[in-house]
Image (spheres, rainbow, N blue to C red):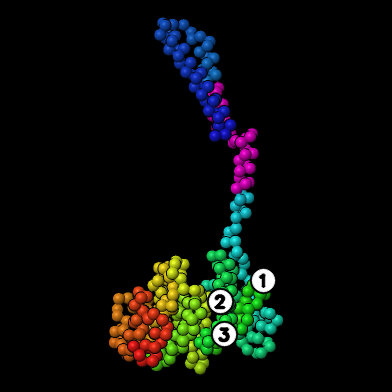
């Protein structure tokens, strides 16, 4: 309570005491039989004092706080405003996104042609190497996401580190990485084709082609897993189809060592890996679930998330004319419990692509 409010309470208390004495004097006079006598001066003095104090209390209640309390309130409001101004509206590392315009020259020899797409963590740009004439893809981290953008930078650093060490015909080729205007740029080869998700949204792929692509995908996963990491986001959107009908895994922004604790969630609608949705773990078998989902999509034009309680193998053979061996392998890869799936890319490749079971 402020000093002003304390003063107001004392005025009201004094006024009530004065009026109380008036009442006592009047009642005392009445009780002693002096009703006929004029009420003495003391009665009027206490009444006038009480009424005056009540009026003063009412007047002070209507008047804005002044004196010592006002500066305190002003200081408190100023401090609060300064505190609000000091707190950033966005995460500390977030900043305005700098987009590269068409025609810009990066690192002295990459002429930007156009922006291809904006992903969840990075921006994908098409450019031409003026030294070789070859087209390349340049990835830069997003700085305008709702979470701390340092995560996007760190993931791109990790992706560049792994790709620089990888060498496999079915894995996107690393070209280089550089920093321009304080922003990390990852340069990889340009694939002249389309991703499997787009290419087979309406037209089902022939089973023989699907098996050939599965052989290439699983070969790449064997290689990736041999480097003690898992991709964690195998789905048709992250696999490109070349003009020569071979496939390439293109996006490694989620690559990590196998995890047995929480924090492994990566979701692609319709292709969610059960253990990653539950934040439990992600290992080689999680990638194999992604392979199963990709094959199911290619054979049906439908994400595996739409299967529900139906038996995958029977659905593939009865509704889509898929062979029993392929249907059985896809069904095993899509088992909810990881322990009942194929336990390695080697085992799945052997069962699906060599005819062994």
- On whether residue 199 falls in the magenta region, the answer is no
Question: Which secondary structure, mark 2?
Answer: helix
The structure residue drawn at horizontal position 53% and vertical position 28%, both measured from the top left corner, is 9
Q: Horizontally, is 262 left or right of 112 in the view?
A: left
Instruction: Tell me the distance, in whole angstroms, between the alpha carbons under discs 2 and 1.
Output: 18 Å
What is the number of the mark on residue 71?
A: none
Q: Position of residue 298 (x, y in %)?
A: 41, 86
Q: In this view of the protein, which residue sits in the foreground, 324 or 121?
A: 324
Q: Nearer the viewer, mark 2 or mark 1?
A: 2
Query: Upstream in the sequence, badge 2 or badge 3?
Result: 2
The residue labelled by disc 2 is 159
Q: Earlier in the sequence, mark 3 or mark 1?
A: 3
Q: Gap between marks 2 and 3, in whole Å?
A: 12 Å
Q: Which mark is residue 173?
A: 3
Q: Is residue 72 magenta?
A: yes
The residue that appears at 57% across and 34% down in the rendered structure is: 2
Report the span colored magenta: 52-80
């Amino acid at each position: 309570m402020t000093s002003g409010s304390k003063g107001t309470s004392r005025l009201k208390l004094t006024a009530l005491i004065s009026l109380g004495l008036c009442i006592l004097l009047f009642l005392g006079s009445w009780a002693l039989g002096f009703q006929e006598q004029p009420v003495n001066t003391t009665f009027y003095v206490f009444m006038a004092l009480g009424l005056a104090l009540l009026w003063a209390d009412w007047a002070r209640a209507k008047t804005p706080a002044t004196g010592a309390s006002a500066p305190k309130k002003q200081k408190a409001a100023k401090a609060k405003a300064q505190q609000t101004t000091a707190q950033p509206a966005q995460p500390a590392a977030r900043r305005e996104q700098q987009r590269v315009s068409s025609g810009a020259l990066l690192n002295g020899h990459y002429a930007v042609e156009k922006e291809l797409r904006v992903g969840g963590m990075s921006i994908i740009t098409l450019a031409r190497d003026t030294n070789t004439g070859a087209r390349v893809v340049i990835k830069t981290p997003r700085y305008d996401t709702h979470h701390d953008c340092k995560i996007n930078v760190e993931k791109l650093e990790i992706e560049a580190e792994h790709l620089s060490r990888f060498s496999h015909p079915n894995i996107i080729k690393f070209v280089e990485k550089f920093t321009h205007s304080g922003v990390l740029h990852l340069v990889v080869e340009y694939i002249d084709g389309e991703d499997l998700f787009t290419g087979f949204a309406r037209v089902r792929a022939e089973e023989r082609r699907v098996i050939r692509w599965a052989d290439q995908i699983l070969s790449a996963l064997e290689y990736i897993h041999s480097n003690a990491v898992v991709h964690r986001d195998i789905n048709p959107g992250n696999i490109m189809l070349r003009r020569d009908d071979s496939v390439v895994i293109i996006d490694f922004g989620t690559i990590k060592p196998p995890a047995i604790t929480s924090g492994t969630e990566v979701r692609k609608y319709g292709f969610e890996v059960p253990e990653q949705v539950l934040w439990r773990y992600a290992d080689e078998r999680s990638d194999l679930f992604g392979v199963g989902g990709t094959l199911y999509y290619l054979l049906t034009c439908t994400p595996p998330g739409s299967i529900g309680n139906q038996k995958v193998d029977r659905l593939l053979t009865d509704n889509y004319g898929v062979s029993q061996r392929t249907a059985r392998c896809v069904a095993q890869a899509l088992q909810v419990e990881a322990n009942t799936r194929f336990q390695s890319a080697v085992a799945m490749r052997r069962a699906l692509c060599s005819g062994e079971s």
